[in-house]
Structure formats: structure tokens, C-alpha cells
Amino acid sequence: MPFGRRTLLAVPALLAGKTPVDAWAQAWPSRPIRLIVPYATGGGTDLLGRAIAEALRPALPHPVVVENRAGGAGVIGSELVARAEPDGHTLMAVVSTHVANRYFLPSLPYDPIKDFTPVALLSRNTMVLATGAAQPYADLRAMLDHARRNPGKVGTGSTESLSSFIGQELARRAKVEMADVQYRSGGQLMNDIVAGHLPVGWTSTASAMPHMQTGRVRVLAVSTATRTPFFPDVPTVQEQGVADFDFSGWVGLYGPAGLPEAVVARLQEALARAFADETLKQRFTTMGIEPDLRPAAGLVQAAQREDRLWAAAAAAGHIKKEQ
């Protein structure tokens, strides 16, 4: 029986005791890796992606190049990755609302679970309620009191499903009317907070950190049950009178469905070395990023929890799909 080209190429690997897939993975990457960030520049996921791309340079023979493909609540960039060849040269850093979008959007051009290969959980996202330094709100209670006196006139900025839900859930529980003002990225939202065009907005610690350091922004509350180490003096929403308020997100690294396990393993090894580097740790701290590196199984568990959260919220009527 004649040998095909692929068989001939695999012979040296077989002789060395390796499978063709393992040998191919050893040669990966053969060109620069595209890291798709399906959001605009300047937000927390973009900052995280660029920091990781730089930290991975010593571990890989070709660079990781961040490519922002914003739009459609992350759908445009995610669809690009779902349709890409599963050869390890196209990856995606995406926030937890990648899973939630199925409950918010009327339809998706992909399945957020089946059409992607989980690689690693990268970070935890504590959301913070930010306001401009010139705004009169000293704390969350003062902001809510002002919103009650001015129903519908205090807009809450958001950048994706999670921050939008947090803002509307706070308004629902506090019994105030606050419009949801949506932005394409945390960077754009924070620019309007600083300029005074937006009274308050929910965003990541990474998006708020640079402006907190300059004194142009105050953080009124954090979304989780415990305080964030980045702003230890800022009380949680629970501490300020809203019981059982505990919401956070994450950033995960995915590839297209069918990504070889050997490539996933090499990526996880490279990420482990990068995250252990003190320079990257310090950079994360400076940017307000909470690293939480876990293998694919950790990302799968996080996605499953996310799916249960949004399914329950939808069943309770607390969220509705866009028309």
C-alpha cells in the first residue's frame, strides 16, 4: 500500500516513540499566535491579554499577538475563533459573560460551550462601582438616596452582561430606578466617569485602578461578599445594606473546538511558567488584576457555575433576552 505524505512525515516521530499528534504539537507554534480579545482596547481583559502575551515570549518560539475584535457583546470576536482552524494559532481571552450571552442575546452564531476548547482559567474579576471624584456621592448609600430622589436620572454604566446585570440587580434590590448605560469597553466607560459624563458605572478592578491611582475616581462598593485586596478600604455592597449580594466574573482562555490535547498541555505549561514570574505578578498587582490560573478543568467548572447562575436568573424573570 502506498504511503501518503502525512504518513511519511509521521515516520520519524513514530520511530522516536511519539504519536504524530505529539510530534506536531512539539513543532507548535509554527507562526505567531493570534490572541483574540473580543472587546475594545483599554479594558481589563485587553490589559490582561497584553500582559500575558508579553510574558509568554520566552516560552514560545513565536510571539502571541493580541487582536481586538470588539462588538456584539463579544460575539464578533468569539465567532471568529469558533470558525478558526483548531491548530493552536488562534486563541481567545474572554470574560465569563461568554457563557451568559445565551441568556441575554436573541441568538448566537455558535455554541459557547461546544464550539470552543477550554485551555485555562486566567483571572478572577471583582466588579467595582466607580464614580468621578467630582460627583457628590461619598458612599453607596448616598448614591442610592440620590437615585431615589431623582428616579431614572442616574445612569449606571456597564460593559457586558455581568456588569449590566449587577447594576440592574442592585437597583432592583434597593428599589431604585437606574438606567443601564452600555459601553463597549471598561476603558471607554472610565473615560466618561472621569469626564463627569457618567455618574456611576460597574467595571473591573483593572479598568478602575489607573484612575484611582490618579485620584480622578472613587470606588463606592465592590460586588463580591468580601473586600478586594486592591481597594481594602472600600466596603462591599453587602456591608452597605444590600443582603446576599455576591457577584464576580472571570477571564478564560479558549481555542476553537478540536484543539489537540498536546497543544493545550503546552499552553498550560507555558502559562504556569509565565504566572510564576515575579515581574508578571507585580504587573498584575499594579494593574488591579487578580490572577487565578487553573487548568482546563477549572475553566469548565467556572463555565458550568456561570451557566447555572444565569439559568436561575432567567427562570426568576430577573433577566430577559434582547429583542
Image (cartoon, rainbow, N blue to C red):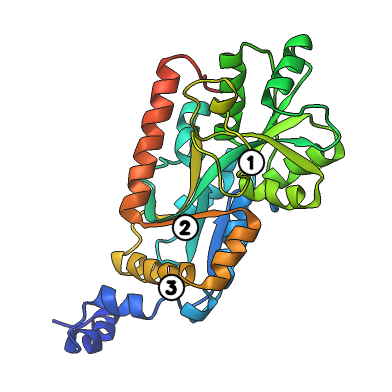
Q: CA distance from mark 3 to mark 1?
A: 33 Å
* Extreme residue toward the left, this view: 1
Name the residue tied to disc 1: 233
- Marks 2 & 3, CB-CB < 8 Å contact: no
Quarter occupied by residue 167: top right
| Amino acid of disc 2 | Ala
Provide residue 152's location: percent of width, then percent of height. 75, 14
Q: Which mark's residue is nearer the viewer, 1 or 2?
A: 1
Name the residue tied to disc 2: 84
Q: Which mark's residue is nearer the viewer, 3 or 1?
A: 1
Provide residue 284's location: percent of width, then percent of height. 58, 60
Q: Who comes first in sequence, dot 1 or dot 2? A: 2
Q: Who comes first in sequence, dot 3 or dot 1? A: 1
| Amino acid of disc 1 | Asp
Q: Which residue sits at x=38%, y=81%?
A: 27
Whether 204 is drawn above or below 103: the answer is: below
Quarter occupied by residue 166: top right
Residue sitting nearer the eye, 207 or 74: 207
Name the residue tied to disc 3: 273
